[in-house]
Amino acid sequence: MSRHGDKGIRFLGLGSRAIDNLRKASIRFCNVPLHAIGIGNHEGESWGSGSVVLAWDSVVAGGCNQEDGHHVTLHEFAHQLDQVDGVADGVPELHGSGSYRAWAKDFSEAYDKFTRKLGRGKRTVIDDYGATNPAEFFAVATETFYEKPKQLSKQYPDLYQQLKGYYQVDPLDWHP
């Protein structure tokens, strides 16, 4: 891993152990759609084998607008963090056994609130794609945490606190 990449992981407060499973990250240019190489029509993919594939135009778009709640790089690497234990279930490796109970409570309550709102046709700060399953909810909530921290902390304060504790950063410090 490059020195820059290692600093980025340490910046998140997760240490290198969180990405030990990452074996390969590939970026495809926008003129090579991901569906053309046999992995679906997506902006990115994350596999339990430790591989991440990203569409370059989506990477650039995610970096250009840091407040739209969409960031494919954050999303796919959140999946990698979730899959450290071999299962994509919306529960990454946490800091101690007591953390899992609190995580399960806060995430399940947030997921239930989120899906109920969507079921009533209401919009929420978290992208609708998060309703797909708990793994997608974690990935989309991660995007929202970094890009729309004020809205997330108001609509889902316990979820925000869980993500803040997990990533060991507070994006509210960066967004005036």
Image: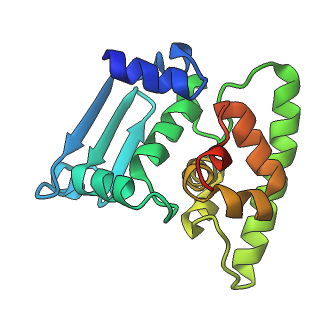
Q: Could you say where residue 24 lies in the image, as x and y percent from the top left?
A: 30, 26
- In the rendered image of this protein, does residue 21 appear above or below residue 83? above
Judged left or right of residue 143, residue 45 is left
Q: Could you say where residue 81 lies in the image, as x and y percent from the top left?
A: 55, 31
Q: Residue furthest bottom?
A: 121
Q: Could you say where residue 133 lies in the image, as x and y percent from the top left?
A: 63, 55
Q: How is the image coloured?
A: rainbow
Q: Could you say where residue 119 lies in the image, as x and y percent from the top left?
A: 72, 79
Query: 86 and 123: which one is in front?
Result: 123
Judged left or right of residue 60, residue 149 is right
Judged left or right of residue 74, residue 39 is left
Query: 129 and 48: which one is in front?
Result: 129
Q: Which residue is rendered at x = 58% and y = 34% of the image?
A: 82
- In the rendered image of this protein, does residue 114 appear above or below residue 169? below
Q: Which residue is rendered at x = 75% and y = 56% of the image?
A: 153
Judged left or right of residue 85, residue 73 is left
Q: Which residue is rendered at x = 84% and y = 55% of the image?
A: 109
Q: Residue furthest front?
A: 176
Q: Quadrant of residue 87?
A: top right
Can residue 1 be seen in this snapshot? Answer: no
Count of number-bearing discs: 0
Q: Quadrant of residue 105?
A: top right
- In the rendered image of this protein, does residue 99 appear above or below residue 117? above
Question: Which of the image's four quarters has the N terminus?
Answer: top left
Can residue 55 be seen in this snapshot? Answer: yes
- In the rendered image of this protein, does residue 117 appear above or below residue 67? below
Question: Which of the image's four quarters has the C terminus?
Answer: bottom right
